[in-house]
Image (cartoon, coloured by chain):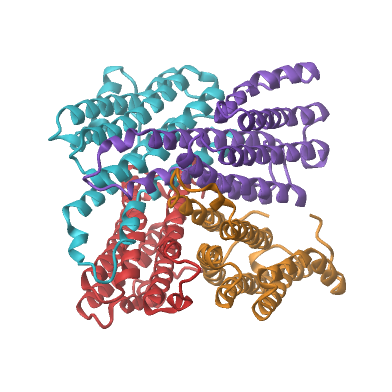
Chain colours: A purple, B orange, C cyan, D red
Amino acid sequence: MHKSPGLHRFLTFVDAIIAIAITLLVLPLVEMTSELTEETSLEELWSPETIGKYGSFVLSFAVIFRLWQVHHKLMEPIESYDRVVGVVTAAWALTIVFMPFPTALIGIYGNEEVPVIALYLLTLFVSSALLTALALYLARRTELHEADVESSKRMAVPSVVTTILTGLAAVIGILVPRVNYGALLLLLLTGVLTVLVNRRLRLPQEEA
Amino acid sequence: MHKSPGLHRFLTFVDAIIAIAITLLVLPLVEMTSELTEETSLEELWSPETIGKYGSFVLSFAVIFRLWQVHHKLMEPIESYDRVVGVVTAAWALTIVFMPFPTALIGIYGNEEVPVIALYLLTLFVSSALLTALALYLARRTELHEADVESSKRMAVPSVVTTILTGLAAVIGILVPRVNYGALLLLLLTGVLTVLVNRRLRLPQEEA
Amino acid sequence: MHKSPGLHRFLTFVDAIIAIAITLLVLPLVEMTSELTEETSLEELWSPETIGKYGSFVLSFAVIFRLWQVHHKLMEPIESYDRVVGVVTAAWALTIVFMPFPTALIGIYGNEEVPVIALYLLTLFVSSALLTALALYLARRTELHEADVESSKRMAVPSVVTTILTGLAAVIGILVPRVNYGALLLLLLTGVLTVLVNRRLRLPQEEA
Amino acid sequence: MHKSPGLHRFLTFVDAIIAIAITLLVLPLVEMTSELTEETSLEELWSPETIGKYGSFVLSFAVIFRLWQVHHKLMEPIESYDRVVGVVTAAWALTIVFMPFPTALIGIYGNEEVPVIALYLLTLFVSSALLTALALYLARRTELHEADVESSKRMAVPSVVTTILTGLAAVIGILVPRVNYGALLLLLLTGVLTVLVNRRLRLPQEEA
């Protein structure tokens, strides 16, 4: 299965955008150092506030990497693309490029402020929902890939599962302030649930 | 139609530049957070000024993505390149790399200041005009691609249409302060006008 | 030996992440200029503090480039990948994306503060150890590449050697403050030691 | 002439680094906006100081793009690489990644300070000299490419010419403060001189 050169260039472009967004996550940490001088106590580096910045950095890195992998998996069998795929993918990339902003906010407000938690979790939810929209569209447009009907359905399962879990995490994280970002641990269930759904729908399991 | 390895590497390089420029658009948002402390009221995040920053971020993301797509489409049938293509593409990339600056200015001055509106819209116009210059040049240099005469003409239509609409948007946006960036909504007409022009010139429609 | 398209896209994505992280190393230098005005004495540019920033920039550039090369070498014969390779590579990329932060800290505290030295050297050690974990895993998973048993073993040698030297450098650099980052000069021995280990294990030498 | 997969990945990695460095040139402009508020007079944007920043941005963009093109041209016929090529290319990439720093300094000090002019021009000279070292090395290592003896020699001509002109520009720019960066206009002679040298050495002209 070969991609059209146009799709190849499009995906490389989008991947570069995501790669940059994931790397910009370190900026609030680097930025923080511009306020330090040689005389600043190093305890600053282990203060709760700073540890919050480390945490939001690692969390967002993991989440963006995960979303990229869902997109990657989704596009693997696709051979060409149309206007809808282009627009939805661009909108998805926009949500990822936006991520360093709510990440930086978490680094400042920690888990104290519900609006900040909500902005972060809802950005993730919209990002994941756009991937699901893309998956469902691709599953129907069989002329864009070589996958048979069963594989087409299976393609959409991981992103549907991820979106439902992200939505659930958003609801729990916003309503139960004590849980907040911890609700994203629900995403660890993606693998198991994908297997279960595939089994339920009698779809073949993916190998990797 | 295969690209020469040299052209392939050139396009990948240019794409990476555009991808980075589009991602740097988030910096004014991240930068803004460096002034916040845990005690800052969150209302700051929904103040008119901040909403202006969100708006300029989304607008510029959409506009750069669109310009990239025009370039992408334009280069699709091209198989090798010469010095003129190299220089014009580099100049075009310069306009895109510059974009985060007028975008950041919009984030500060909103739609209050005509010079800022003018800088933004004229940068877009120059960027689009360079793409058109490239398209017209490529349409004549048939030895750089395999397209026949009709396809060559058709190649240039979307960027000519985009450039005329951007120029019109610049004139309206600068002369009618109440419209300002809203004039860019004219770009939504690109698709329809391209079809109309192709029909008028009796050129075959593109499929995608 | 051809890589699966999925692996190709994955590696390009990871490479882009590393390329950005290595380029962000210049930010503390650029950042520093934002405090300068036309009236600032230029002696600032050659002050010991600034020279520390130049040093940490060059050191981190060399170290990240070296780690990337180990990864590059390691993946060269690999043809496809599984979940473990994906997760370990993502974790490795995380350590590299983090690097601009300890680099910026060195630029401020120089070699005066043991915790800063420790953070820097331990980040490098973890990064290198993840590459070794990847190498050892790949050496056993012969279905992911076409290398024979001897080549598989040889693949792991450079990263094992690098990790041991980085670990040693971390111990020395932390315990002997006068040596600090100088301990990384141990890494210059990687080439020689790799040859020696290969000879000892009677493995064929690599050509390049 | 096909590149080895290892060389392909190496070049893509280096290209990404250069692409990011060229894009970071806009940061001093974006940074400048973070000091503006809605009340700042817009005249700031056309002050001599700001115009200096625009100038240094465009100058460095053009110079880096040019150096990248020399590298691009140089590597076009190369099919595999060795340790020397790897190390020299990495050192060259380091000079490019460093460029945003002297560029930012120019943005502040303009053409008033000889040390700043010297730092900028010497960085360019070192960068260009490393490309020439690479070219001369590659011309001798015929096993790394398929070019015949004459083409090998011709490969080195553009970078030798560029390096001599950059060195001359550095000497003039440092010694004659009134000329300063204007000395780089000498680089416009690269094309003509390359043709002349090729003719003198009775080497065939390149087509593009």
Where's the C terminus of chain A, which quadrant? top right
Q: Nearer the viewer, residue C37 or C170?
A: C37
Say if residue D32 shows up in the picture: yes
Numbered disc total? 0
Task: Tell me which corner region of the image, top left, top right, bottom left or bottom right, holds residue C193.
Answer: top left
Which residue occupies 25% across, 68% down? D116
Please indicate whether residue C2 sits to the left or right of residue D120 in the image.
Answer: right
The x, y position of residue C125, in whole percent, is 32, 28
Q: Nearer the viewer, residue B142 or C67?
A: C67
Where's the N terminus of chain A, which quadrant? top right
Q: Nearer the viewer, residue B207 or C53?
A: C53
The x, y position of residue D177, in whole percent, is 23, 80
Q: Is residue A119 above or below residue C73?
A: below
Q: Is residue D148 above or below residue B184?
A: above
Q: Is residue A206 above or below residue D111?
A: above
Which residue occupies 65% across, 58% down? B62
The x, y position of residue A61, in whole percent, is 51, 36
Q: Is residue C105 above or below residue C168?
A: below
The x, y position of residue D12, in whole percent, is 48, 48
Please indicate whether residue B200 sits to the left or right of residue D132 in the image.
Answer: right
Please indicate whether residue D49 sits to the left or right of residue D176 in the image.
Answer: right
Please indicate whether residue A184 sits to the left or right of residue B162 in the image.
Answer: left
Residue at far bottom of view: D178
